[in-house]
Amino acid sequence: MASKAIFYHAGCPVCVSAEQAVANAIDPSKYTVEIVHLGTDKARIAEAEKAGVKSVPALVIDGAAFHINFGAGIDDLK
Amino acid sequence: MASKAIFYHAGCPVCVSAEQAVANAIDPSKYTVEIVHLGTDKARIAEAEKAGVKSVPALVIDGAAFHINFGAGIDDLK
């Protein structure tokens, strides 16, 4: 059975599509990926914090939180 | 044919095994993952920079660089 990986984000307009590239690249035979938008699903913030999530987007795999930062330049935000 | 994803790291003793969890979770039918240790393979630093890598570990997928930070606490480093 596949383990569960959870991708937490908050709808960052610049980053979300690029970051989902990471979530979508995950092997479905190894992990079932759940996408959680903490901006709209605030009830799950406590759960994310408990998993070690300090910032979004983050991917929790096998109980370990990985914080993913897309290397967007300031110019991309203008 | 699978696209190529490249995981760049520099042998961080605390982080490397945990971060490879991310690389190893990637679907091999979608991406062929290459692991590059920039500490020992310095000839590839320029290529990594060109792909937008600002820090390691980083995962380059479809030409986009994602910087991955494991949320290790200071206590984990002691």
Image (cartoon, coloured by chain):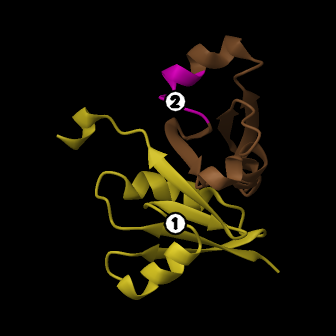
Chain colours: A yellow, B brown
Residue B51 is a magenta residue: yes
Image point (57%, 61%), residue name: A23
- The magenta-colored residue range is B48-56
x and y percentages locating residue B1 in the rendered image: 71, 44
Q: Amino acid at mark 1?
A: Val
The quadrant in which residue B16 appears is: top right
Image point (73%, 29%), residue name: B36
In this rendering, the answer to whether A71 lies above or below A51 is above
Q: Is residue B1 visible?
A: no
Q: Amino acid at mark 2?
A: Val
Q: Nearer the viewer, mark 2 or mark 1?
A: 1
Q: Is residue B2 left or right of residue A24?
A: right
Give the dominant element type of the magenta stretch: helix, strand or loop. loop
x and y percentages locating residue A50 in the rendered image: 56, 77
Q: Disc 1 designates what residue?
A: A53
Q: Chain of mark 2?
A: B
Q: Is residue A14 visible?
A: yes
In this rendering, the answer to whether B10 lies above or below A41 is above
The quadrant in which residue B8 appears is: top right
x and y percentages locating residue A14 in the rendered image: 30, 51
Residue A25 is a magenta residue: no
In depth, the one of A73 and B34 nearer the eye is A73
| The label number, if any, that marks residue A76 in the structure image | none
Q: Disc 2 designates what residue?
A: B53
Q: Is residue A37 left or right of residue B61?
A: left
Q: Is residue B20 left or right of residue A58?
A: right
In this rendering, the answer to whether A64 lies above or below A47 is above
In depth, the one of A34 and B68 nearer the eye is B68
